[in-house]
Amino acid sequence: MKTAITFSPSHEVHTQPGHVERPERLQAIQTLLNQDGILESLMQVKSHLATKEDVLLVHPESYYDSLVAASEAGTVWLDSDTYSTPGSLGVALEALGGLLQVTEAVVKEKASNGFAIVRPPGHHARPAEAMGFCLLANISIAARWIQKNTNLRRILIVDFDVHHGNGTQEIFYEDPDVLYISTHQSPLYPGTGALLETGAKEGNRSTINIPLPAKTGDDTLLYVFKEILKPRVAQFNPEFILVSAGYDAHWLDPIGGMNITVSGFASVLKEILDWATTYASERLVALLEGGYHAEALAHSVLTTLRLMNSRQATASDPFGPNPAQGSIHDQLKNYLVEIASIHAL
């Protein structure tokens, strides 16, 4: 089976001059994928508009109605950095619909895994509030869609965006059937995702936050996935894995500062793909979140698709490591011990 992908064909109508979450992000990805030729080996899934019923799996009807009203009002700001244009709700529904189409392809074993290369992102969207460039809680809706339409219950969501996915955490904070893992830079927007935010009530220990400092680097990030997170994933034994794939931790990104390389993302993805093989019968779907250096983003997505299609593939990393910053892994050893003790089995 092939890797399924989808794009947002109408994404360019969601735009605001000067905003960092801009159409050029997807344009750069599509250009590089076409140049590389990888698209011929992938299963391309046509996007369709998600339904209101899909949105209501996570969001209240009053919030959906507010997005409709915002679209009818013209170009408006929903918070200090999240905009809506007359076409934005349609683009968001198209992005969500594409994600659900890819998810369905994996569920029905038409594809082994999949990647929804869409915008706007979603992991900051709260149930009743747009936030952080995000209108709809895409990855959360996909998790609820899986639970509603299949007999799969245990969903693992892995979020390696440089920013904490506060919306995803909020939605599943008391849910024992969804394990949410976030590695993110701290301190940084949105200010959530502390080490001791681990879930509540029946969802106690169903949230794993790994806040990491700026300049963390590849070595530490991979260590976290292999040595700290892997045992918790084994204990949870997920039936489906969803990935909030944000690439703004790259060292060239204008927003983040975690000093990750394309090859670093590749190493982490290999680990997550191993989890999918071991526990989830290969079932894995990734969703594009952040990543605001267009070229670094494009090469990160290309590398992800190469590895999803073949574990033996090589990274497309023309940038290499940050020439001004070496590894700080040794400086973080005591902190990593603290993290491991908090999330120990």
Image: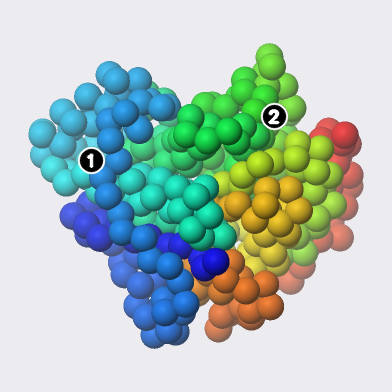
Residue 248 position within the rendered picture, expressed as x and y whole percent measured from the top left = 52, 58
Check disc 1: other Cα within 10 Å, few if <14, some if 14-19, many if 20+. many
Q: Residue at x 25, y 60 (%)?
A: 9
Amino acid type indicated by mark 1: Leu
Q: Is residue 211 left or right of residue 305?
A: right
Are the two marked residues, 1 and 2, in contact with CB atoms closer than 8 angstroms?
A: no
Q: Earlier in the sequence, mark 1 or mark 2?
A: 1
Q: Is residue 267 left or right of residue 187?
A: right
Q: Secondary structure at mark 2?
A: loop
Residue bearing mark 1: 89
Q: Residue at x 26, y 45 (%)?
A: 49
Query: In the rendered image of this protein, does residue 212 appear above or below residue 153?
Result: below
Q: Is residue 38 left or right of residue 1?
A: left
Residue 1 position within the rendered picture, expressed as x and y whole percent measured from the top left = 55, 66
Q: Residue at x 48, y 30 (%)?
A: 148
Distance from the alpha carbon under mark 1 to that under mark 2: 31 Å
Instruction: Pick the residue in front: 15 or 327.
Output: 15
Instruction: Pick the residue in front: 335 or 263.
Output: 263
Q: Quadrant of residue 66?
A: top left
Q: Is residue 81 left or right of residue 245?
A: left
Q: Which mark is residue 206?
A: 2
> Which image quarter is the C terminus in?
top right
Q: Is residue 133 visible?
A: no
Q: Secondary structure at mark 1?
A: helix
